[in-house]
Amino acid sequence: MLELLARKHNLWLSMVLGFGCDYDTAQDIVQSMYLRMHKYIKDEGRIMYNDDEVNRFFIYITLKNMYRTYVTAEKKFVWYEVREDDAIDTEMMEGAFDEAMEIAFQTLMVRIEGEMSTWHKYDRILSEKYLKSDYSLRDIASGSGISLTSIFNSMRENKKILKKKFGEDWEDFKNGDYHLI
């Protein structure tokens, strides 16, 4: 099967180049297509047309899908070129990164505490006790004499409020997008 596919190598290459791909990447995609056909097509008859010609449309669709997968994966990564004359002091960058992270975290905590300060006293004290200490809900229930169910329900509602108002900011923080907070 690989011999049949390789006979039309220039055709497959021109198809991928027609998608807007550079030459080297097109070569890689065509070679990957060969490997994919060898791995997944056990019966050559599935990709043959009239028993002597490779089904060009099938190969075209395969190449198109492989190119789309490549483009999608390429968009997920940001490539930076580092040259010797552009050397960066990594300690300085790490320090700036840590400082930005700390500022973003503190900003987020101030916003959350500001929101919690507007809550009913019961919800505010309960949330502060739970979030700022190592106490579990069971510990709080046994120490306060309030039922575990009541504490659990209150905390669930409080967490919903915080997620609704600050969930996006928290995701930005986790992703390192500190400038968005």
Image (cartoon, rainbow, N blue to C red):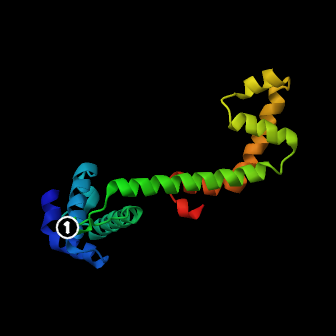
Is 142 left or right of 109, judged from the image as shown? Answer: right
Position of the C terminus by quadrant: bottom right
Please name whichever residue, 136 or 44, is drawn nearer the observer in this view of the structure.
136
Inspect the image, locate mark 1, and give the three-letter code of the amino acid beneath it: Gln
* Residue 104: x %, y % from top left: 57, 56
Q: Is residue 106 above or below residue 129?
A: below
* Residue 112: x %, y % from top left: 71, 51
Q: Residue at x 22, y 54 (%)?
A: 35
Give the quarter of the image for residue 46: bottom left
Decide if residue 85 is in sight here.
Answer: yes
Q: Residue at x 22, y 76 (%)?
A: 14
Is 27 left or right of 96, judged from the image as shown? Answer: left
* Residue 29: x %, y % from top left: 25, 64
Decide if residue 49 is in sight here.
Answer: no
Image mark count: 1
* Residue 52: x %, y % from top left: 18, 65
Residue linked to disc 1: 27
Q: Secondary structure under badge 1?
A: helix
Q: Residue furthest top?
A: 142
Q: Is residue 166 above or below residue 143?
A: below
Q: Residue at x 34, y 68 (%)?
A: 64
Position of the N terminus by quadrant: bottom left
